[in-house]
Image (cartoon, coloured by chain):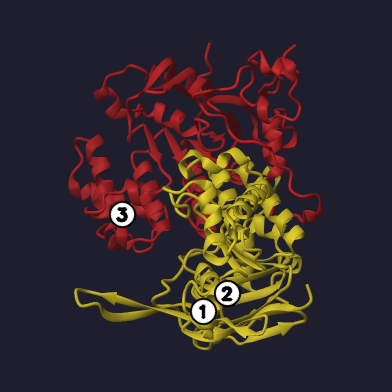
Amino acid sequence: MREDNTILEINNLKTYFYTDKGVVPAVDDVSIKVKKGQIVGIVGESGCGKSMTSLSIMQLIAPPGKIAGGEIRFDQKNLVGISKQEMRSIRGNEISMIFQEPMTSLNPVYPVGKQVAETLLLHNANMTKAEAKRKVIEMFAMVGIPEPEKRYSVYPHQLSGGLRQRVMIAMALICRSKLLIADEPTTALDVTIEAQILKLMKNLQAEIDTSIIMITHNLGIVAEMCDYVYVMYAGKIMEQADVFDLFDNPKHPYTEGLLKSIPRRDVHQNKSKGLYSIEGMVPNMLQLPRGCRFHPRCEYAVDACREVEPQLVDMGNDHLVRCIKYNQ
Amino acid sequence: MDKPLMQVRNVKKYFPVDKGLFGKKTGTVHAVDDISFDVYEKETLAIVGESGCGKSTLGRTLIRLLDATEGTAHFEGRDIFSLSQNELRQLRKEMQIIFQDPFASLNPRMKVSDIIAEPLITHESLGKKEREDRVAELMELVGLRKAYGSRYPHMFSGGQRQRIGIARALALHPKFIVCDEPVSALDVSIQSQIINLLQKLQEQNNLTYLFISHDLSVVRYFSDRIGVMFLGKMMELGPTEEVYRQPLHPYTKFLIAAAPVPDPRSRNQEKLILEGDIPSPLRPPSGCRFHTRCPYVQDICKSKEPEIQQFDGRSVACHFPLV
């Protein structure tokens, strides 16, 4: 029996893009679980499939992309294949999303408060406009927007990047979503503003008890925010573990390499040895290497890595890794 | 790292702000406002700060991609800002720039080998064979396969494009390179490759870098000295390790503390977070420009701009430095 504190369970999700040049397996047999109140990180570099995973959850994959297999169970219901109408009542209401660039996700010709109120009115047929406005102003105050009444009627361009992202968070949380997907929410922001937004997200998460999927390339953000982490590479989950376990004891050579290659602001590193770096680059998704997708860049690669695709192996303690070293 | 290669004195760069149909001047952005420092031979001087602080404008002004409003910058004894066009052309060989966005800084219609050869054509009178040899040498130096020379930029990943930009910058044996956020657009695993490449090239060719970045982690690893800018002003300047161990300016302290650390155990420490937004550079606050966000603000900070104070080898512009 499934534990009933699981809010989202993705099983063997395959999101493929059928292009003229061939099939791109952007998300390839990915399984992810999010528990109630948990912050789950999906970390990886550009093109690893982390954003496509989130767009699949939202059922926002556009042709030539398609969900080619698997299921996405949200609150016991499989979202793959449900009607557009049904999905519309979930999207923005029970599951909401914030993106990297708040300017492109806000409509430039409507006041920001009105846009947030629209979300509320859309999902609550009985609500009056005045009531929605009051709720939006309350929410603006909650996400730390100064002078919320005044800001209700300003346009997106009149706000700074940090304030725009706060508006997006207000919009995402105003319906008290059960799940918030944050796709690189602070990547476009300055570092002092990023710190504010991350703190806000953490506080709100504790207050509203929303689950969060945090999609990021930044291992610092993962370490600071997440409870459980999935590491993706070329469409596959390479490793998944509790955040402390992952940073203390990374098992996949890719995870290990990533952690070793980032400079740190909190420790002095000797420059004479150079920074550790993973050689080579991410594979072309149209011509994936045989066997393990990471093998051309892996310093531990052996012959078998070039032949057999390794399976995810459970190392105990909810720590899974996809590497032949552990495939016995 | 003993002799100054460049002496920057009281440099100002202002931009007029026009509005309306007739372009009436409505204000001035003080992008770089009275900045002085030295750049020493073979060092990496990092300039850090958040968007709009003027760090990129400073870098571009120092190599005269922009004309300074006031001040001087002496490079090997000559004031860069007062050179004639002809003299400037000569100087361009010595000073180069590497840009952040490897997608916007390479001409999509030119082959890679032509992109790298272009500075050689405009500045040196080499024969075809010599030029091809030099291009091949440069490509090898930055880790690009020779066969890539006949390809176009769109066929390359971000990291490889950055290598092309670096090869072009090195073509004329420069002494001084402005690196304007050279790794910010790159993935984590590629970022360390490019940092290592920049380090190797610096050691081999005795290069001096002005390394402009917003990434406090990369800067701690890569730079010898660091200058922290805020709204056009240099708030603090000093040797990198000393500044990180004991920042003198409150802004430096909070800026360093803001960057997330890749260690889950540090999450339990109470984090120093600056409140408020970055003020508009069009209407900078009176007195100390940082006073609206500074947790230690006093009355004098609101009215009087702080003088730069020196503390053996370090400088700070604050009424109440953290000593």
Q: Using the image, name the chain to which the residue with label 1 belongs.
A: B
**Drawn side of residue A232 relative to residue B321, left or right:** left
Badges 2 and 1: C-beta atoms under 8 Å apart?
Answer: yes
Question: How many other residues sit within 10 Å of disc 3, few (<14), some (14-19) or many (≥20)?
Answer: many
- Total labels drawn: 3
In this structure image, what is the colour of chain B? yellow
Q: Residue B240 versus residue B138: which sits nearer the camera?
A: B138
Question: Circle 3 sits on which residue?
Answer: A137
- The vertical placement of A296 against A266, above or below, is above
Q: Which mark is residue B86?
A: 1
Question: Picture quarter containing residue B277?
Answer: bottom left
Q: Residue B289 versus residue B149: which sits nearer the camera?
A: B149
Residue B256 in the image: state x and y as whole percent: 64, 61
Question: Circle 2 sits on which residue?
Answer: B90
Q: Amino acid at mark 1?
A: Asn
Q: Using the image, name the chain to which the residue with label 3 belongs.
A: A
What is the letter of the red chain? A
Q: Amino acid at mark 2?
A: Gln
- The vertical placement of A169 against B289, above or below, is above
Instruction: Decide if residue A17 is in sight here.
Output: yes
- The vertical placement of B161 against A82, above or below, is below
Q: Using the image, name the chain to which the residue with label 2 belongs.
A: B
Q: Amino acid at mark 3?
A: Ile
Q: CA distance from mark 3 to mark 2?
A: 60 Å
**SS assignment at label 3:** helix
Question: Picture quarter containing residue A40?
Answer: top right
